[in-house]
Image (cartoon, rainbow, N blue to C red):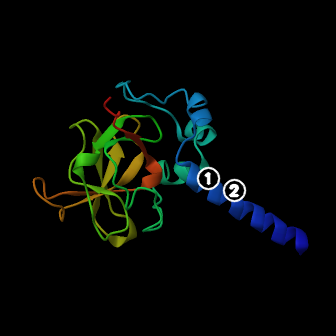
Amino acid sequence: MKSLIIKIAFSLLLITMAEKSGAQSGNFKTNNPYYSRTATTPLKVSNAEWKKILKPELYQVAREGATETAFTGKYDEFDEKGTYFCAVCGNPLFLSTSKFATTCGWPSFYQPLTKNSVKYRKDTSYNMIRSEVLCGRCDSHLGHIFDDGPNPTGKRFCMNSVCLEFVPNSKKK
């Protein structure tokens, strides 16, 4: 019983450390040969290969379509200036200037960075009809899009924080 409690405590510590470290660490990117913030070539990588490369929590959401719990993502109430990239492949997705405050529990944007930053797919899971948002380069699940966002688009790109990597704007000297 004592060893089980120690294993559970250790597991919780690892989960907490992983959440604080973000979707990827510097070492992680070195091990991901597909990650690039400049490449535009679409990726055709099997889920078996992604599973070897990605952290389990990122794989579960990005490749299996899971959703992180509302109000737990690191970018939900995050308000810095910069660019959001796909945590799986490095594709530029959103500018911070298109992010807006919501009460939905996930970071939300009113438009992607470019027309090709994201793709859409019909999602009929959970007895709902929604539009799933996928990375335009690696086809990873990012979240969903809804028609209740602000002007100028009226759209709300409701994204999972674990699938995003934020890079702040460079400070001017």
Q: How many marks?
A: 2
Residue 18 numbered mark, or none: 1
**Residue at left 54%, top 53%?**
60
Q: Residues within 10 Å of mark 2 (few under 14, many from 20)?
A: few
Q: Is residue 16 above or below residue 37?
A: below
Judging depth in this view, the residue of 123 and 9 nearest the camera is 9
Q: Is residue 113 left or right of residue 68?
A: left
Judging depth in this view, the residue of 18 and 124 nearest the camera is 18
Which quarter of the image is occupied by the N terminus?
A: bottom right
**Residue at left 70%, top 60%?**
13
Which amino acid, mark 2? Leu
**Where on the picture, by quarter, is residue 7?**
bottom right
Q: Residues within 10 Å of mark 1 (few under 14, many from 20)?
A: some
Residue at the far front in the pictured view: 173
- CA separation, marks 1 and 2? 6 Å
Residue at the far left in the pictured view: 152
Which amino acid, mark 1? Ala
Residue at the far bottom in the pictured view: 1
Q: Is residue 75 above or below residue 39?
A: below
Residue 14 numbered mark, or none: 2
- x and y, in percent, of residue 89 in the image: 45, 35
**Where on the picture, by quarter, is residue 112?**
top left
**Residue at left 18%, top 62%?**
147
- x and y, in percent, of residue 11 in the image: 73, 61
Disc 2 secondary structure class: helix
